[in-house]
Amino acid sequence: MIRPEDLLPDDTLIAVMGPRNSGKDRILDVVVRGVGGQVLPQSPPPAIRTYTITAIGRKSQRLVLACFPDFDGSNDVVVLQLISHWLKATYERGLRLTGILYTYRISDFIPKVSDLKDLFIFGQLCGDRALARTTIVTTMWDKVDESEGEGCERMMSEICWKEMLKWGCRTARFDDTFRSAMGILNKLIDSGGEKEPLLVQEELVDLKMLWNETQAGRMLHASCHAALEEDKAELKKTQQGIHTGIIRGRMQWSTQAMKELEIPFNRYFAFRFPKKGKIVSLAGFATVLRVSDLVRREEL
């Protein structure tokens, strides 16, 4: 495992993100085993898994893969703190991501609200400018008929990923082989383009924000508040029983998370107007938010 302080100035740094069980850990395992490395037992979640390999055919270039935990609803506050700290530490050392892989299960013909929330928080962390160095990697093609997978891929590209693709984001298919994984990584590395900082890195380092004051922190607070209001409404309609205990448990978690994400009043307006040159733009993820609202209504 590599800590931010162990990274070298010439490292090629790739972040791997995505919802739970979307294949991001599988991609990392295939790459590491493919170069003769040893996959270590996973740390207790949530944790960032990092591995270094020598990029094949790249004159001993060191490639660092960092697999980030997902926002599954159980440890979102801890996950945001963990990711924010890691990205802040790397940026303070003068390191910027070469690219980002974001995984999606092609077997999910209809995206889940939790998956769309994970994607939108990803947008809050990275911002639009990172999309030119982002590849959406569809996984688990062996679980579906190829025509069905292609239909899902087309639907997601035309709806959920539409704006992201306009901002330069790419798509790729992972077929569970080392050759496929390295092909995706090499294409991302060779895509070029300026290595600009992520939105959350600018917020934390350049604008001196606290982790909960960032776009991602505010969005997570709003998400917890919405979940709390939905549970309150559901509790009124639910009779006494086991289910009420589950709802109350969720409400307790949301309330605690909101307290941790609360911004002190004396800092609330401090970053309302960013410094010149620091433009907060999330246009590439506008479609994701609209689709998330529609899917949420269907699930309710």
Image: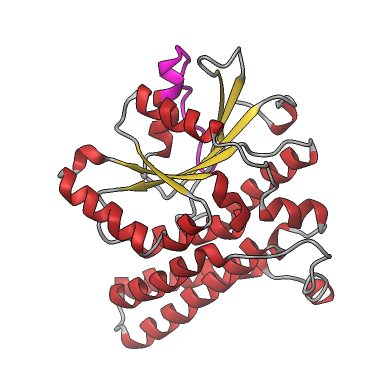
Residue sitting at 50 percent across and 77 percent down?
Answer: 226
Q: Position of residue 16 (x, y in %)?
A: 51, 40
Please provide the residue range marked out in magenta: 31-47
Q: Measured from the top left, where is residue 29 in percent x and y?
A: 42, 26
- Along the line of sight, the residue nearer the viewer: 256 or 79: 79
Query: Where's residue 123, x and y in %?
Result: 55, 58
Work out which quarter of the rendered image holds the N terminus and state it: top right
Quarter of the image with the C terminus in it: bottom left
Residue 251 on image: x %, y %: 48, 73
Give left or right: position of 15 versus 33. Answer: right
Left or right: 231 in relation to 223: left
Look at the image and name its color scheme.
Answer: secondary structure
In the visual, does 173 lie left or right of 275? left
Quadrant assignment, res 216: bottom right
Is 39 part of what is drawn in magenta? yes
Vertical side of 124 occupied by 11: above or below: above
